[in-house]
Image: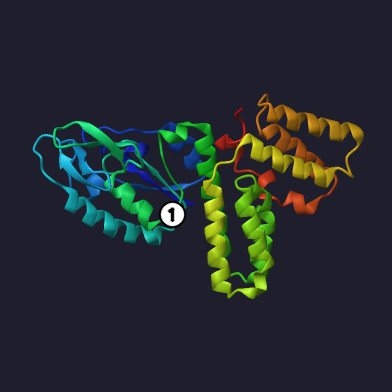
Amino acid sequence: MRIGISSCLLGHRVRYDGGHKRDHYLTDTLGRFVEFVPVCPEVECGLGVPREPMRLEGSPGSPRLVTARSRIDLTARMVSWAQEKVRQLEREGLCGFIFKSKSPSSGMQGVKIYNDRGVVYKRGTGIFAGIFIEHFPLVPVEDEARLHGMGIRENFIQRIFALKRWRELLADRPGRQELLSFHARERLAILSHSARHYSLMEKLTAENGKLPRGELYSKYESLFLQALQLKTTVKKNVKVLRHILAYLEKELTGNEKQELVEVIEQYEQEFIPLIVPLTISKHYVQKYGQQHLLEQVYLNPQPLETRLTNHV
C-alpha cells in the first residue's frame, strides 16, 4: 500500500532552514504497513535547501506564494510543477497522502494567508495540497498534526486500508457477484460510519442486474469512499455491536449474553475501549460458527500495532 507523504515528515532535511520534521508514529508504526512515496514541493520545483521562507498572500480561493523578504512571486512555478506532479502520481496508485501542516505548499487546511499589509487575515490550503485534493477527491488525506488526534487517525487509517481492499478487488477484473461478496464483508464497517450510505449501498447492490457493470462499480466506489469519510462515533459503534448481538442472541447462553450486553454498555459509557466489545463479540462469533460475521471487516480491524481501537 503506497501512501504519499511530505518528505520532511520522514526525516528528510528539505525544510527552508535545512531541518526536518520527522514524525515517529508515521515512520516507526504506520511505516511498517505502508510504502511511503515522499514529496517535497519546494525542492522538486527547483528551490534550494536552505532557502528563504515563503508564505501565502491574497485571496484564499487563489492565493499567491511569495518569498517573505525578497517578495518573489513563485505561484506560477509552484502551480505548474504541482499540476504535472499530480499527473505523475496517478501512476503510483496512492491510497492516501499525509501533508505537512501549516506549510504554504503542503498544508491541508488552516495555512496562514496574509493581506497586503502583512497581517494574517484568512486561513486556507497550501498550493500543492489544494491541487492534489482537487485531482484526487476520494483519496484519503490528512496532515501529521491532525493525526495526533486518535479519532482522526483511526478514520484515516481505516480509509487507506479500505481503499487498498477496493483497489485489490478492481485489480482482479471482478464481475457482479464479486461486488456482492465485497459488500457483504464491508457491510457492518459501512454501517459504523453512515447509516444513510449503508441504505443507499444496500439498495444499489440489490439492483445489481439493472445497471451496466461500469456504472454499478462507479456508483458503488463513490458511495463506499464517501461513507468512510464520515467519522465513526461511540453511538454508531454501539448500533453495530447490538446488531451483532441480535445475530448471536439465539446461540448465546444467559451468562454469555449478559457479558456481551454489559461490555457494550461499558463501551457506550466510555469506560472501556472499542477493542473490548469487538474481541468478545468475535470470540462468540467464532464459538458459534457464524461465518457471515466472521468475514466482516468490522470484526477484523487493521493491525493492532496501529493502535486504532484501543483508546477510550
Task: Tell me: 67 left or right of 186.
Answer: left
Q: Quadrant of residue 54?
A: top left
Q: Quadrant for the C terminus, please.
A: top right
Q: How many marks?
A: 1
Which residue type carries mark 1? Leu
Q: Determine the residue positioned at 53% across, 42% down.
A: 155
Q: Quadrant of residue 117?
A: top left
Is the residue 115 above or below the residue 288 in the image? above
Residue 179 or 50: which is nearer the viewer?
Answer: 179
Q: Quadrant of residue 82?
A: bottom left
Residue 248 or 37: which is nearer the viewer?
Answer: 248
Task: Tell me: 138 left or right of 188.
Answer: left
Is any part of residue 286 visible from this angle? no
Taking the view exactly as shown, the residue that stands out farthest to the top is 271
Residue under numbered circle 1 = 94
Element type at mark 1: loop
* Label 1 crowd (10 A; few <14 / some 14-19 / many >=20): many
Is the residue 183 above or below the residue 302 in the image? below
Is any part of residue 134 visible from this angle? yes
Q: Determine the residue positioned at 80% across, 44% down.
A: 285
Is the residue 134 above or below the residue 309 in the image? below
- Counting from the top left corner in percent of width and height, residue 288 is at 85, 46
- Counting from the top left corner in percent of width and height, residue 148 is at 46, 31
Q: Determine the residue positioned at 58% across, 73% down.
A: 213
- Counting from the top left corner in percent of width and height, residue 223 is at 55, 57
Residue 285 or 112: which is nearer the viewer?
Answer: 112
- Counting from the top left corner in percent of width and height, residue 271 is at 68, 24
- Give the image's coloring scheme: rainbow
Residue 99 or 172: which is nearer the viewer?
Answer: 99
Task: Tell me: 116 left or right of 303.
Answer: left
